[in-house]
Image: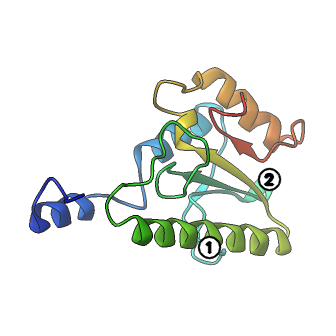
Amino acid sequence: MADIVDKETRSRMMSGIRGKDTKPEIVVRKLLHSEGFRFRLHRKDLPGRPDIVLPKYRTAILVHGCFWHGHDDCHLFRLPRSRTAFWQEKIAGNQARDRKNILLLHDLGWRTLEIWECALKGKLKLETGPIAERICAFLEGRERADEISSKNR
């Protein structure tokens, strides 16, 4: 299937997609701040430059976009029908890098919490109160689940 826009337009659209300061990331940061947590952003000395780092809790929070990180069985993830092989390879590489960085963080003694975009937006998003409670519970050691998404309510 051919692209619906020309190459230059597609290039401009794709260049507008950022890896830092995304809307889901900002939602999580505001939520953490309102709960009284203080954090650092994108620490270069940690594997994968985690989106949010809470040194006091030795925790790294990774805010994943459902498309870019290939969130299985998610309503926000659909593999494009054009250049399928390219996208499968791209997303599989992102997933492999995520797994590697999480293992490296664990080896360094850090806990990780993955928050998926679908928990924060879309038709199945969770309310901010329960998300805040789950993050607080994880940081305080009351919850062991290391992932928050619309699938694991």
Query: Do labels 2 and 1 touch, CB within 8 Å?
Result: no
Q: Position of residue 124 (x, y in %)?
A: 54, 25
Question: Which residue type does callout 1 highlight?
Answer: Arg
Q: Residue furthest bottom?
A: 45
At label 2, which amino acid type do we have?
Tyr
**Residue at the image point whose x is 63% and y is 45% from the top:** 115
Identify the mark nearer the N-term, 2 or 1. 2
Q: Nearer the viewer, mark 2 or mark 1?
A: 1
Left or right for 59, reference 93: right
107 vs 64, nearest the viewer: 64
Where does the N terminus fall, quadrant-wise?
bottom left
Q: Using the image, determine if residue 133 lies above or below residue 22.
A: above
Could you give the CA–CA distance between mark 2 and mark 1, rounded to whole angstroms?
A: 24 Å
Vertical side of 101 occupied by 143: above or below? above
Which label is found at residue 57?
2
Residue 14 locus on image (x, y percent): 26, 62
Question: Depth check: 70 or 141 in front?
Answer: 70
Q: Identify which residue is drawn at 65% across, 32% down.
A: 35
User: Which x, y percent locates residue 21?
Assistant: 41, 53
What number is the disc on residue 34?
Answer: none
| SS at badge 2 | helix
Label placed on residue 97: 1
Give percent across and percent down for residue 100. 70, 74
Relative to 65, residue 48 above or below:
below
Q: Please identify the residue farthest to the front as the structure is shown.
A: 1
Nearest the viewer among 81 and 55 is 81
Image quadrant assignment for residue 98? bottom right
* Residue drawn where x is 73% and y is 28% of the image: 133
User: Could you classify mark 2 by the number of other residues whose Cα lies within 10 Å: few (under 14), some (14-19), or many (20 or more)?
Assistant: some
Tally of numbered tags: 2
Q: Secondary structure at mark 1?
A: helix
